[in-house]
Image (cartoon, rainbow, N blue to C red):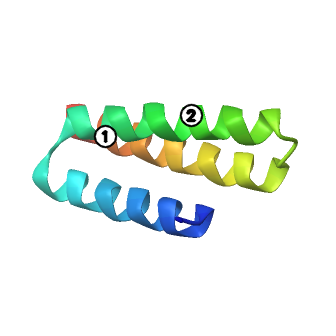
Amino acid sequence: MLSIDQIIEHMEREIAQGRLEGRREELRQIQYAAGMLMRAAEGRGDKDSARRFRLVASQAANVREELEK
């Protein structure tokens, strides 16, 4: 089973790859997925995981915005 750490590490690698390759749609999908996982963590009262997923979602959004300029 994947851990939250492994999921976040994977998303962060994909964000870095998305930046290099200009994959805006994939970055949007990562942002959405991280947002959904953030809400799931919030629903379970896991504030630390929710915060970590929020950071990943904002990281994906920032890179997407950077690529659109």
How many numbered tags mark residues here? 2
Taking depth in this image into account, of 49 and 57 the one nearest to the observer is 49
Task: Mark yes or no: residue 69 visible.
Answer: no
51 to 67, vertically: above or below: below
Q: Which amino acid lies under the numbered mark 1 shown in the image of this protein?
A: Leu
69 to 2, vertically: above or below: above
Near mark 2 (Cα within 10 A), the count class, few <14, some 14-19 or many ≥20, is some
Give coordinates of residue 51: x percent, y percent.
72, 49
Give the alpha-carbon distance from disc 2 to disc 1, as whole Å: 12 Å
Could you say which disc has been placed on residue 36 in the image? none
Give coordinates of residue 12: x percent, y percent.
41, 61
Give coordinates of residue 45: x percent, y percent.
88, 42
Q: Which amino acid lies under the numbered mark 2 shown in the image of this protein?
A: Gly
Taking depth in this image into account, of 8 and 3 the one nearest to the observer is 3
Task: Mark yes or no: residue 51 visible.
Answer: yes
51 relative position to 23: left or right? right
25 relative position to 64: left or right? left
Answer with mark 2 or mark 1, whichever residue precedes in sequence: 1
Residue placed farthest to the left in the image? 21
48 to 24, vertically: above or below: below
The image quadrant where one finds the C terminus is top left
Secondary-structure class at tag 1 = helix
Q: Residue at x 72, y 46 (%)?
A: 50
Residue 20 falls in which quadrant of the image? bottom left
Q: Which residue is mark 1?
A: 27
Q: Residue at x 47, y 48 (%)?
A: 59
Could you say which disc has been placed on residue 35 in the image? 2
Q: Residue at x 60, y 40 (%)?
A: 37
Taking depth in this image into account, of 66 and 31 the one nearest to the observer is 31
